[in-house]
Amino acid sequence: MKRILLAVSGGIAAYKAIDLTSKLTQAGYEVRVMLTENAQEFVTPLAFQAISRNPVYTNTFKEENPAEIQHVALGDWADAIVVAPATANLIAKLSNGIADDMITSTLLATETPTFIAPAMNVHMYENNRTQHNMAVLKSDGYQFLEPGEGYLACGYVAKGRMEEPLQILTRLETFFNEEPVTNHTHSSFAGKRALVTAGPTIEELDPVRYLSNHSSGKIGYALSEALADRGAKVTLVSGPTHLAQPEHANIEVIQVQSAEEMFEAVKSKYKQIDIVFKAAAVSDYTPAEALTHKLKKQDGELAVTFKRTPDILKYLGEHKTHQYLVGFAAETQHITEYAQQKLQKKNANVIIANNVGDKSIGFSSDDNDYTMHFANQEVIALGKDTKISLAAKILDALETRWQ
Ligand code: C5P
């Protein structure tokens, strides 16, 4: 069981630290919490004690175990430390080596990997002093969970919201899985605009029946999260899925039903987009005529005429200005050959091919096995893995290749 030491400083986002403690505990981490005096103006030690089922630390001089020095032992105990929320004041103290309370003393006395989730008013965040202090900490190896943009308690709608607990959990999972942790500021996706399509489409035959497919949307959602984690602004155009809505501040979700609706949503965003991941399983056909009333059953066979839907990726390839296009190819045979053909036909930069004939992977499964086929003939086999890890591997492969 991995051990997380959560340091909570005194900002209104401290309430989110309670949710974070709960999510970490439910995900199987052992959590211990430290609170500054100011944090206790917003949240109580008891709340964290009840959720973590561990003692909570607030006072450097309250040494309850004579066998150890608490602010040294706690840092050694942890596999990772998360400071969430990290106020401007705490960041300033840490970057200057001040150790005048439980949290700053522990942080100064440890070499354990430490993640910092700033949360503050936008002007405090943008203030040169704060920016300087954060730059010092980054160069010292502290990992930052960048604040998102959104509604701030002070009334501004701007950057400064603490990263969502779910994203912090995801980041820790990635860290413990020993995936390469990409620093936002160093990622080639940071500040870029990405469009991801995900899931199936639904083509209505009549008000109660439709044509669809087994796509779960998992890889498109995983890609959206991974892109957002690397600092991209993501528009996720999603067909109907059973997946939870991403809560990341960098992800805007547009829900659609049919191929036609997906086409319209994608077209409306395309001009401003830098990179497209066309992971949706778009239906190639839709009923030629959508009936306004339920089709009544009758004796004998039923023949329905279908017409083609727009090929969205092909359209994007034809109207490309600067955009980088990543298509997917779900095939049951001749996978490599079809991927190469698709690159040409759709004017895409990469086709990510997989074998949907293998039932242990693909569609609804959590796993897949992808091969990336680049327009310059380069082929990268990513191997069989979870879709979450594959999303990271896809972005790792693209980091240096896509621009
Ligand atoms: O042509 P095919 O369906 O095999 O190509 C798959 C790729 O094309 C996927 O990236 C898929 O999202 C995209 N596609 C599309 N519009 C369609 C059909 C497929 O964008 N109507």
Image: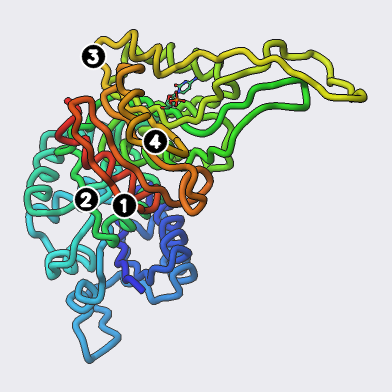
Residue receiving disc 3: 322
Mark whose residue sits in front, 1 or 4: 4
Which residue is farthest bottom? 67
The crowd level at tag 3 (other Cα within 10 Å; few <14, some 14-19, many 20+) is few
| Label 3 CB-ligand 1 distance < 8 A | no
Disc on the earlier residue, 3 or 2: 2
Q: In which quarter of the image is the C terminus?
A: top left
Q: Does the residue labelled 2 lie within 8 Å of ligand 1?
A: no
| Residue at which label 1 appears | 171
Disc 3 + disc 2, Cβ < 8 Å: no
Q: Which residue is drawn at 50% across and 13% down?
A: 310
Q: Which of marks 1 and 3 is in front?
A: 3
Which quadrant, please, contains the N terminus?
A: bottom left
Q: Earlier in the sequence, mark 4 or mark 3?
A: 3
Q: How far apart are the two marked residues, 1 and 3, measured between alpha carbons?
A: 31 Å
Label 1 environment density (alpha carbons within 10 Å; few <14, some 14–19, many ≥20): some
Q: Which amino acid does label 1 sit on?
A: Arg
Amino acid, disc 2: Val
Question: Do the numbered discs 2 and 1 sit on residues whose CB atoms are within 8 Å?
Answer: yes
Q: Which of marks 3 and 2 is in front?
A: 3
Name the kind of residue labelled 4 in the image: His
Does the beta carbon of the residue at mark 1 sit less than 8 Å from ligand 1?
A: no
**Could you say which disc has been placed on residue 334 in the image?**
4
Helix, strand or loop at label 2? It is loop
In the picture of the structure, the residue carrying the numbered disc 2 is 181
